[in-house]
Image (spheres, rainbow, N blue to C red):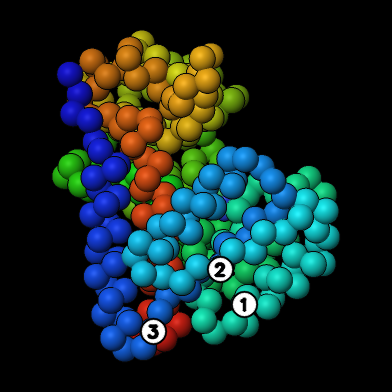
């Protein structure tokens, strides 16, 4: 039987800490501000953006939503980013991905000021993460690490396997585990012997985006299993990348879906926005 790591509880604690620090900043006349840009009407993006705005209100930040129509041009979007880069009340800028196909995501990410890039997607911030000298950590991998720390799980010397190599999760996840002296393997769609590699994992992070992809025979007895996936199963029910029913009895720790990594992403976004506000206002 695995210990279930509650992202609900850990994220509430992180948000409470951010709220306390936000109150201290307010006493100095500083109110952290986050701008959230959403283009088009992707229903999942709408849910995420609403949750981000709600979290801002709860911790005491100001949030501004910029909901642009799907036909928005690249020039219009870049002009908005530039305006927000220069707006002092806005400390963090987040452009919800994916963008409609005619828009160039890379150009938009590159246009966001690295100092306001609370997603940590800008190449300058990605590079800083690579060398271990960063202001902002990418929200989802940082949230996974927060869950690991909340249970006092030691990463040093452990075999860590990350399934998935996205820029948003897989690659930075591997880097954060490496920073804590894990021995890290990244698996992906071309990996040979995926099952055997996963079986060697003391810490297994699933970020593939395929419902119930990780089965019991891929997991070592006593492994820590961290599930980044948010998918729908054949009945339309929310599920992760891990087959929870099968894997839970073999794991020592496991994160559920929902209520695991998901709530951590937004909590870490709040943490990054607070940090951005502190840096931009010269507060230690
Ligand atoms: N789309 C899916 N996850 C994310 C995220 O963490 N940030 C942004 N901006 N878009 C996303």
Please give the count of numbered marks on the rendered protein. 3
* Residue beneath the point at 52% across and 20% down: 236
- Quick one: SS at disc 2? strand
Judged left or right of residue 62, residue 225 is: left
Instruction: Please determine whether, in this image, residue 50 is positioned above or below residue 63.
Output: above
Question: Can you see residue 130?
Answer: no
Question: Can you see residue 240?
Answer: yes
- Quick one: SS at disc 1? helix
Which residue in the structure is indicated by mark 2? 64
* Residue beneath the point at 54% across and 45% down: 47
Judged left or right of residue 79, residue 151 is: left
Which residue in the structure is indicated by mark 3? 30
Q: What quarter of the picture does the N terminus occupy?
A: top left
Sooner in the amino-acid sequence: mark 2 or mark 1:
2
- The percent coordinates of residue 76 (x first, y second) are 79, 67
> Which of labels 3 and 1 is toward the front?
3
Sooner in the amino-acid sequence: mark 3 or mark 1:
3
- Quick one: SS at disc 3? loop
- The percent coordinates of residue 229 (x first, y second) are 46, 32
Q: Which mark is residue 85?
A: 1
Sooner in the amino-acid sequence: mark 2 or mark 3:
3
Query: Quarter of the image holding residue 151?
Result: top left
- Quote the CA–CA distance across marks 2 and 1: 13 Å
Q: What quarter of the picture does the C terminus occupy?
A: bottom left
Callout 1 crowding tier (Cα within 10 Å): few <14, some 14–19, many ≥20: many
């Amino acid at each position: 039987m695995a210990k279930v790591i509650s992202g609900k509880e850990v994220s509430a604690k992180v948000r409470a800490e951010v709220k306390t620090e936000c109150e201290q900043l307010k006493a100095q006349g500083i109110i952290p501000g986050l701008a959230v840009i959403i283009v088009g009407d992707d229903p999942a993006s709408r849910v995420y953006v609403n949750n981000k705005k709600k979290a801002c209100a709860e911790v005491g930040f100001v949030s501004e939503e910029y909901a642009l129509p799907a036909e928005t041009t690249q020039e219009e979007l870049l002009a908005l980013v530039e305006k927000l880069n220069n707006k002092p009340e806005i400390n963090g800028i987040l452009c919800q991905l994916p963008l409609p196909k005619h828009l160039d995501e890379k150009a938009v990410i590159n246009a966001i000021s690295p100092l306001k890039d609370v997603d940590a997607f800008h190449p300058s911030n990605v590079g800083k993460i690579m060398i271990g000298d960063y202001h902002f950590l990418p929200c989802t991998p940082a949230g996974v690490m927060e869950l690991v720390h909340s249970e006092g799980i030691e990463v040093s010397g452990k075999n860590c396997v990350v399934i998935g190599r996205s820029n948003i999760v897989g690659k930075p996840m591997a880097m954060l585990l490496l920073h804590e002296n894990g021995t890290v393997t990244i698996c992906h769609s071309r990996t040979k012997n995926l099952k055997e590699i996963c079986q060697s994992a003391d810490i297994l992070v699933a970020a593939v985006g395929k419902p119930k992809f990780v089965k019991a025979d891929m997991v070592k007895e006593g492994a820590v299993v961290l599930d980044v996936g948010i998918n729908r199963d054949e009945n339309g029910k929310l599920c992760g990348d891990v087959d929870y029913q099968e894997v839970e009895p073999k794991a020592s720790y496991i994160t559920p879906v929902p209520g695991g990594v998901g709530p951590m992403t937004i909590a870490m976004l709040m943490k990054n926005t607070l940090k951005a506000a502190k840096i931009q206002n010269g507060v230690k």
